[in-house]
Amino acid sequence: MPLQKFEEKVQLEYNLIPSRSKLGRARRASVKHIRGEDDDQYKMLWDYGEELRQKNPGNKFYLCIKEIFDEKTKETKEHFSTLYWSLDACKRGWLMGCRPIIFVDGCHIKTRYKGNLLTVVGIDPNDCISPLAFGIVEVESTSSWEWFLAS
C-alpha cells in the first residue's frame, strides 16, 4: 500500500496525523510480520528441497551455493548462487496431454537480494499454462540460461 493511501486510512480510522517516517516504519514492521525475514526463508530452502525429493523421487531440486570471504569479519560465508526445481507430476502431465511446445522466460526478483527467476512452461489443451521448471540465478546471462536449460 502506498504511504499516501496508508496515511489516509490512518487518518480516517484513528483520527491521527502520523509523520511519514512513522508510517514508513509501521509499513515495514507490518510487512516483516506478514512475510517474515528473507534470511529465514533462504535458510529453509534445504529443508524444502529435501521434502520435495522425499515426497516424489522424480522431482528435481538443485541448490548451489558459493563461499564468499567477508573482509569485515575475516570469515568465509556461504552465499546463495543458483536454484533449480521441477516437479515430476507437472512434467509427466505435459508429456501426456499438452502441446509439444515450451516457452521460456525470465523476470527480475525485486527483493533486497535481487536475482532473476527463469521459467519453462507448456500450454495445455485448454490454453492454460502448465509450469515445467523454475530456476533462480544471480544474473540473467547466456551461461545462466545454458545451466538452467541443461538441468
Image (tube, rainbow, N blue to C red):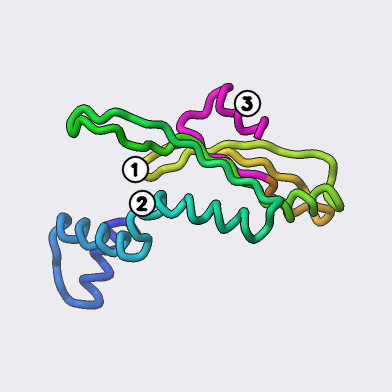
Judged from the image, the secondary structure of the residue bearing numbered disc 1 is loop
Which numbered marker is on residue 112? 1
Query: Which span of residues is magenta-colored?
Result: 133-151
Between 80 and 133, the one nearer to me in the picture: 80
Three-letter amino acid code at the position of disc 2? Asp
In which image quadrant can residue 41 be found? Answer: bottom left
In the image, what residue occupies the spot 68% across and 49% down?
131
Task: Give the residue pinned by disc 2.
Answer: 38
In which image quadrant can residue 31 be found? Answer: bottom left
In the drawing, does residue 81 fall left or right of residue 117? left
Sequence-first tag of 1 and 3? 1
User: Where's the N terminus, which quadrant?
Assistant: bottom left
Is residue 82 on the magenta stretch? no
Judged from the image, the secondary structure of the residue bearing numbered disc 3 is helix
Q: Residues within 10 Å of mark 3 (few under 14, many from 20)?
A: few
Marks 1, 3: nearer the viewer: 3
State if disc 2 and disc 1 touch (CB < 8 Å): yes
